[in-house]
Image (tube, grey):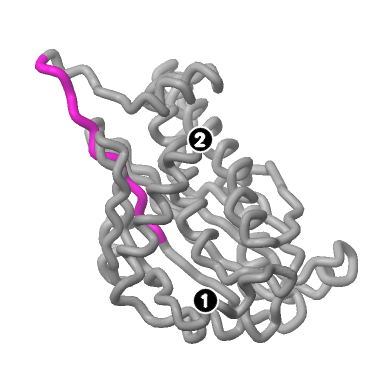
Amino acid sequence: MTRFLAIVFAALLLAACSGEKKYVRYAALYEEAPHSIVISPLFDLSTRKTDADSALRAQYANRDAVSRFFVNTLPIGLQQRGYHTRPNDTILLPGIGSAKRLKALQSGDLTRFCSQMDADAVLITTLLAWKDKRTEPALFVEYQLRSTKSGRDLMHTWVKISRTIDTTYKGELIPLLEEIALADSLHVSIECAMRCLMVQQANIFVTQDLPFTTKSYHFKKDLYLPAIQQYFNATISNEGALLVTPSTMEEFENDCFL
């Protein structure tokens, strides 16, 4: 974990070099200065078919394991920035009910969270697509942090997180040591562990870019530091390096939905 946090921090610096300053990107967040964040259920919109085929069932079980790992690792970066989090390990799959709930969270009134849960903001995460290319899997994730008081977006980011995987001359995948350890600890396949690491790094990368809370000594000391892009691609290499490149809405949507 420590090694990957260092890699993510280095990637943050590289990715942010040409981006806008934090006081611009997170102007509303600095102004409202939230402390308590409720994490919503993960809305998993990746396509799933109802099929009795055992291979498909195994694939869906992997997706559920990755989704569960996603929501369990979301608080890490937030807590390191000084935010008090209320985790939520619920995963909502595609359906009319989940679509209505997602729309309500993304654009509806959130004052009930403020009054009932004493929360300053709600973090809404959506797994938009899952592309299972064997040597370059990719996940497309949307992060939206909304104020419970004003309803404003305090952060809105879209990420394509992928993994370039080398293979042996026999065509076998070559995993990282961290992925092997993760597979053992979670009792999942190497392929599933690779995707778990991908979502963990995406979570840490996005949340570690947020400004510190007012309770932190570092509050407002990062105003003029560059922020990450609203749309970007993050790729984990087989050496464990995290390569981050800016993207656009058009590029993201073409990769995600076409």
* Quadrant of residue 70 within the rendered picture: top right
Residue 65, image x, y percentages: 54, 30
Which stretch is magenta?
159-169
Residue 97 seen: no
Residue 222 badge: 1
In the rendered structure, the answer to whether residue 167 lies left or right of residue 97 reads left
Give the Cα distance between marks 2 and 1.
Answer: 33 Å
Name the amino acid type tagged 1. Asp
Q: Is residue 126 left or right of residue 92?
A: left
- In which image quadrant can residue 179 be found? top left
Callout 1: 10 Å neighbours few (<14), some, many (20+)? some
The reply to whether residue 56 is in sight is yes
Q: Is residue 257 magenta?
A: no
Determine which of the numbered discs, if any, sits on residue 66 in the image: 2
Q: Residues within 10 Å of mark 2 (few under 14, many from 20)?
A: many
Secondary element at image label 1: loop
- Rendered position, 191 above or below 250: above
The residue at the far left in this view is 169
